[in-house]
């Protein structure tokens, strides 16, 4: 059953991240404000932060590089957040899962550093365009909430009709909007012995890879041309790092 209250919280979340970014940019300036908003937004939802920042980049193309860095900072928070959740519920999963997650974190931080260098080289080029407006982005938030509802329905159907394949399918579908729920769920299942540790590892890794892909797609659909180009490249590198490191680890396990 769909919980309308949960959906409304998503709308408030996406809009709230946009408003927080607006306030911090006004107080701290564009660069520091976006960076701090990205970090704080990543503690709650890196996907929602991506939605908010991608939409803002179309209104303020001059902020695209800074906004892209904020999005990647939000994504960086996702990896340690997942490891903390796994560690609290079933720490042995970290024996295999931590390697690809740390590799993706380092790849993401590399992207942040690269964009920081690019920004330093182009500093002053577009200061006159750094105006922010429209802090409450309800239309974008409602679109995100609708997508969440559709994914939620499909995930529940997958869990109902499939076995381990259903776990993987649910992980992939849930990863479009969120990694926390599936991380906690499969960690608990592994702890209770209902699924194997390797199945849980694959499921969580799959959710993080899908979520990273989803954020690249969101940036492509909602963002400015510059933001699209930047994030697709960075996320492509992060995905490649995660796939290769995950495959190496799982190859050794199996």
Image: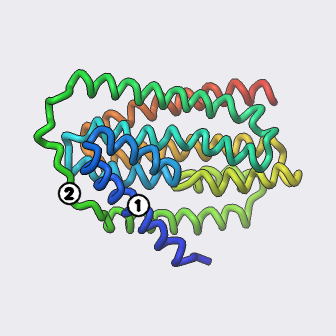
Q: Quadrant of residue 23?
A: bottom left
Nearest the viewer among 199 and 193 is 193
Rendered residue at 61%/47% (across/down): 207
Farthest residue to the right: give it.
Answer: 193
Nearest the viewer among 107 and 245 is 107
Task: Pinpoint residue 216: horizontal percent, then vertical percent.
Answer: 42, 42
Which of disc 1 and disc 2 is earlier in sequence? Answer: 1
Rendered residue at 78%/39% (across/down): 93
In the picture of the structure, the residue carrying the numbered disc 1 is 14
Residue 182 placement, left or right of 189:
left
Q: Would you place residue 123 above or below residue 195 in this image?
A: above
Task: Pinpoint residue 61: horizontal percent, then vertical percent.
Answer: 20, 43
Secondary element at tag 1: helix
Within 10 Å of disc 2 (Cα), the crowding (few <14, some 14-19, many 20+) is few
The figure's colour scheme reads: rainbow
Q: Which mark is residue 133?
A: 2
Residue 13 placement, left or right of 89:
left
């Amino acid at each position: 059953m769909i919980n309308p209250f949960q959906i409304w919280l998503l709308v408030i979340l996406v809009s709230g991240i946009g408003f927080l970014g607006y306030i911090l940019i006004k107080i701290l300036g564009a660069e520091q404000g976006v960076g701090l908003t990205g970090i704080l937004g990543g503690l709650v939802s890196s996907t929602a932060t991506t939605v908010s920042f991608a939409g803002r980049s179309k209104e303020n193309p001059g902020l695209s590089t800074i906004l892209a860095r904020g999005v990647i900072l939000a994504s960086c928070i996702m990896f340690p957040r997942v490891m903390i959740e796994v560690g609290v519920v079933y720490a042995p999963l970290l024996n295999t899962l931590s390697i690809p997650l740390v590799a993706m974190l380092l790849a993401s931080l590399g992207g942040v550093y690269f964009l920081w260098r690019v920004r330093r080289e182009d500093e002053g080029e577009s200061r006159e365009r750094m105006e922010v407006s429209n802090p409450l982005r309800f239309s974008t938030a409602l679109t995100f909430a609708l997508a969440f509802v559709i994914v939620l329905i499909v995930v529940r159907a997958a869990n109902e009709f499939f076995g381990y394949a259903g776990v993987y399918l649910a992980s992939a579908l849930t990863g479009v909007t969120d990694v926390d729920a599936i991380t906690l769920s499969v960690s608990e299942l592994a702890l209770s012995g209902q699924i194997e540790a390797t199945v849980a590892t694959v499921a969580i890794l799959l959710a993080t890879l899908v979520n990273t892909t989803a954020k690249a797609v969101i940036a492509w659909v909602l963002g400015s041309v510059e933001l699209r180009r930047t994030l697709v490249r960075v996320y492509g590198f992060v995905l490649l790092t995660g796939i290769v490191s995950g495959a190496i680890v799982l190859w050794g396990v199996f």
